[in-house]
């Protein structure tokens, strides 16, 4: 089985729903407040925002990876329709750094996430098949014997993506996974991510501060801004893929996002009256 066997039950609900979410670290001010969002099955949502607005904290909170601090966390998170009370085995994270273990080869790094509690126990053959399928999906078929020291930055990030895919996620949660890569490798990885999400019928929530990446990859873009952080605007990206082929639509959306990003960072941020309706379609 691979993730294309996602059951009908998985697709009945939004993969992820957050309602009126707020979070603050124990000794700090609230990081974000009033965050409501949804990710539909097979949808790619990009969370865009300036540095420090709380994107990573929100992503970790949505993955149930932030410990709750009494009195500073509120709101609801549902995963596949059920309240989320622990990290879910079918939500897989990808980080900016690949985080590979140097003493394991690419295949064993890919299978690494399968060995933890909450992951279903797999027979040895099933496990090997999952690893092989995941490595194939990221273009590393036959290269599972390479060690991290033998991988380029792009290849290492492919292994990190394979490690996430091996868990057959219905949702990939990615925090600036390509920002440490050179421009050409980043473009290849952006294409690969879209391709893998479509072929594996998973959904993705991608944190980025790169406007072009959000337009190239996202079906929807959520703009986060303010202190504490909020979702201040939302765009549905109705530009045919590959997005770069429609230069006029791409540029128009880019300029709009840029202006909104600046407005969100200005003192006072975007005012409620200047906000578009949440379902605004600009392109
Ligand atoms: N473990 C922590 N303890 C206390 N405060 C933290 C912690 N992690 C982050 N913060 C604070 O929370 C706020 C949001 O940080 P976060 O890393 O979520 O922002 P970000 O939008 O991801 O920024 P960047 O784009 O630079 O990655 C910042 O003010 C940061 O200092
Ligand atoms: Mg961050």
Image (spheres, rainbow, N blue to C red):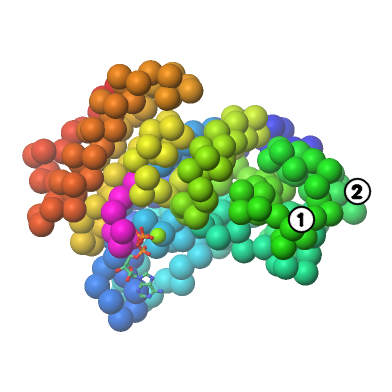
Where's residue 67, x and y in %? 46, 72
Residue, disc 1:
106
Count neighbours of disc 1 (C-alpha within 10 A) and say few if under 14, some if 14 to 19, many if 20 or more: many
SS under mark 1: helix
Q: Tell me which residue sits at (47%, 22%) in the image.
A: 241
Ligand 1 rendered quadrant = bottom left
The residue positioned 56% from the left and 43% from the top of the image is 185
Give the number of the disc on residue 205. none
Q: Which residue is mark 2?
A: 125
Camera sees residue 66: yes
Q: Label 2's element?
A: helix
- Magenta run includes residue 69: no
Mark closest to the chain's N terminus, 1 or 2? 1
**Image quadrant assignment for residue 243:** top left
Farthest bottom residue?
Answer: 27
* Residue 117 % position (x, y): 71, 65
Which quarter of the rendered picture does the C terminus lie within?
top left
Quadrant hosting residue 145 = bottom right
Range of residues picked out in magenta = 48-54
Residue appearing at x 31%, y 74% in the figure:
71
The residue lying toward the viewer, choosing from 191 and 11, is: 191
The residue closer to the viewer here, 239 or 24, is 239
- Residue 9 showing in the rendered view: no
Residue 213 in the image: x percent, y percent? 42, 39
């Amino acid at each position: 089985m691979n993730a294309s066997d996602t059951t009908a039950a998985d697709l009945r609900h939004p993969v992820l729903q957050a309602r009126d979410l707020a979070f603050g670290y124990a000794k700090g001010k609230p990081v974000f407040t009033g965050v409501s969002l949804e990710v539909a099955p097979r949808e790619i949502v990009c969370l865009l925002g300036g540095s420090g607005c709380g994107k990573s904290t929100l992503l970790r909170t949505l993955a149930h990876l932030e410990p709750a601090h009494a009195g500073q966390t509120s709101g609801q998170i549902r995963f596949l329709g059920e309240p989320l009370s622990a990290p879910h085995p079918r939500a897989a994270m990808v980080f900016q750094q690949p985080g590979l273990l140097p003493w394991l080869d690419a295949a064993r790094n890919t299978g690494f996430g399968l060995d933890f509690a909450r992951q279903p126990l797999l027979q040895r053959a099933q496990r090997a098949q999952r690893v092989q399928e995941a490595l194939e999906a990221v273009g590393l078929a036959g290269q599972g014997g390479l060690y991290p020291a033998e991988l380029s930055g792009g290849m290492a990030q492919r292994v990190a993506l394979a490690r996430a895919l091996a868990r057959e996620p219905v949702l990939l949660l990615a925090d600036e996974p390509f920002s440490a890569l050179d421009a050409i490798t980043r473009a290849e990885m952006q294409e690969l991510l879209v391709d893998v999400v479509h072929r594996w019928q998973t959904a993705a929530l991608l944190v980025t501060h790169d406007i072009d990446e959000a337009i190239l990859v996202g079906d929807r873009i959520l703009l986060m801004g303010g202190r504490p952080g909020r979702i201040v605007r939302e765009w549905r990206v109705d530009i045919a893929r590959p997005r770069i082929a429609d230069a006029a639509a791409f540029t128009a959306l880019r300029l709009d996002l840029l202006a909104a990003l600046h407005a969100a960072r200005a003192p006072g941020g975007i005012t409620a009256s200047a906000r578009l309706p949440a379902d605004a379609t600009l392109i």
